[in-house]
Amino acid sequence: MPDLIVVGAVESTRIAVEAAHGTEGWNVKAVVTLPPDRSARHSDYCDLSPLCKQIGAQVIHAPKINEPAILDRIRATEPDLILVVGWSQICDAEFLAIRPGRVLGYHPAPLPRLRGRAAIPWTILLREPITAGTLFWIDEGTDSGPIMGQRFFHVAPDETAQSLYDKHMAVLAPMIRETLQRIGRGETAGDVQDERYATYAARRTQADGLIDWNSPVAEIDRLVRAVGEPYPGAFTHRGEDRIVIWQAEPDYDPSHEASVPGQIVALSDDAFSVRTPDGLLRVMSWEQDGGEKLRVHQRLA
């Protein structure tokens, strides 16, 4: 029975481990993951140790995947296949050389479109109507290796990061099982990506979630949906206090035109509305650092 190892540290990694473990003819020998004290690297970090204990897989904690000592431990497992799902660090050439041509990765985008980082937020920010989850052979390029599996699905106009993340999780497990079965039968060539359609997504940081109240309300709404849970969230400031907005919706009520962008024009126990150049953003869920209550007509940064 061929052995594989899984590399990752988030919820999608857990799903990948379970799917691989449940695929006839494959054995999950080890899981390479972040140690718990590095969990802050991922807002959706998942402790995989209990699952590994349950299925009898070795745990290899790797603060840095390309360190010589970590590479030696991975080599010692003698894997027939390496599956990388939910891992933000770049796997260098020496890592790929552990099992040349047999390092399989998952990317939450319809490769060759949106290669790179933060594909789920960018899918929403770019108003992509259709996306896909993709399994591909990792090479030394950026998400550029041959495609082994791809499942497409629609992106709703009101899609959030969480709902889109959930759609990817729904296609991930069956796609892994199908792909491992094909690899087990010797079907390993994959489909070469067409470079004519390649686009690239830049890295996003927490600071990119800052709201510009001079932007159109639809654009602010997209930002809130794109960077919400399981990501750090869109945010604004009230003085020195930081307010993270988790759920909101555009409101084109014209009755508050006598106000300026960034001004709170309505406030209740469960919502508040902020003026933008072309409408209001009605905020239904938020988190505030400071203890003072919001006030009507107060300006936000």
Image (cartoon, helix red, strand yellow):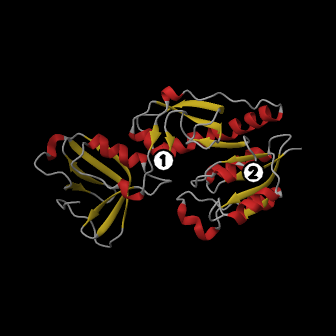
Question: Can you tell which quarter of the image residue 144 is in?
Answer: top right
Would you name the residue on which mark 2 appears?
98
Picture layout, residue 105 above or below residue 264 = above
Q: Nearer the viewer, residue 120 or 295?
A: 120
Q: What's the residue type where badge 2 is placed? A: Ile
Q: Which residue lies furthest to the bottom in this view?
A: 291
Q: Please tell me the numbered disc located at residue 89.
A: none
Contact (Cβ within 8 Å) of mark 1 with mark 2: no
The structure residue drawn at horizontal position 13% and vertical position 45%, both measured from the top left corner, is: 257
Q: Quadrant of the N terminus?
A: top right
For the residue carrying disc 1, how many other residues have a C-alpha within 10 Å: few (<14), some (14-19), or many (20+)?
some
Picture layout, residue 295 above or below residue 247 = below
For the question of whether residue 2 can be seen, the reply is: yes
Q: What's the residue type where badge 1 is placed? A: Ala
Picture layout, residue 249 above or below residue 208 = above
Query: How far across and down, in percent of the image, does residue 25 sit?
Result: 86, 40
Q: What element carries label 2?
A: loop
Q: Nearer the viewer, residue 300 or 253?
A: 300
Picture layout, residue 38 above or below residue 139 = below
State how far apart marks 1 and 2 are (Cα): 27 Å
The structure residue drawn at horizontal position 32% and vertical position 73%, both measured from the top left corner, is: 291
Question: Can you tell which quarter of the image residue 19 is in?
Answer: top right
The structure residue drawn at horizontal position 28% and vertical position 63%, both measured from the top left corner, is: 237
Would you name the residue on which mark 1 appears?
118
For the residue carrying disc 2, how many other residues have a C-alpha within 10 Å: few (<14), some (14-19), or many (20+)?
many
